[in-house]
Amino acid sequence: MHIKHSLPEIIREIKEKQKEAEDEIKQLGPPLPSSQADKMHLLWNMITEFVQTYKNQIGGKYDARRKLTAKSGPQRQELSGGARIKMGFYKLYSDLE
């Protein structure tokens, strides 16, 4: 009788956990490729995108993907472009002194 009474709650909890796991998997994005050719293609695309983003930052071009969104409070201004790279080098070299 106890099992019969508890079973619906256990099933509901299992379905809830399953949905949470599926949502987390969706947030992770598509799986990594398995074949060598697909892995090489993914890596090439990532490198190309990185290089293009780096060139745009140095050139000071606007990138909508990096736009800051206002949260609960005033929008914070951050360095971008060459100024951001310059600050990175200053931090790097100040640690070495």
Image (cartoon, helix red, strand yellow):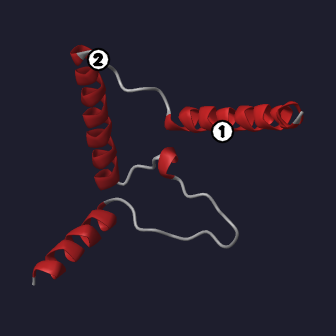
- Give the side of residue 48 with respect to residue 12, left or right: left
Q: Residues within 10 Å of mark 2 (few under 14, many from 20)?
A: few
Between 23 and 53, the residue placed more toward the observer is 23
Image quadrant of residue 35? Answer: top left
- Give the side of residue 97 with respect to residue 23, left or right: left
- Helix, strand or loop at mark 2: helix
Image quadrant of residue 82? Answer: bottom left
Image quadrant of residue 17? Answer: top right
- Give the side of residue 64 with respect to residue 84, left or right: right
Residue 20 marker: 1
Residue at left offset 31%, top offset 52%: 59
In the depicted structure, whether residue 29 falls above or below residue 78: above
- Give the side of residue 2 with respect to residue 87, left or right: right
Q: Which x, y percent locates residue 44?
A: 24, 28
In the depicted structure, whether residue 85 falls above or below residue 31: below
| Quarter of the image where the C terminus is located | bottom left
Q: Residues within 10 Å of mark 1 (few under 14, many from 20)?
A: few
In the depicted structure, whether residue 19 falls above or below residue 65: above
Residue 38 marker: 2
Between 92 and 59, the residue placed more toward the observer is 92
Between 65 and 33, the residue placed more toward the observer is 33
Q: Which x, y percent locates residue 24?
A: 58, 39
Q: Residue furthest bottom?
A: 97
Q: Amino acid at mark 2?
A: Asp
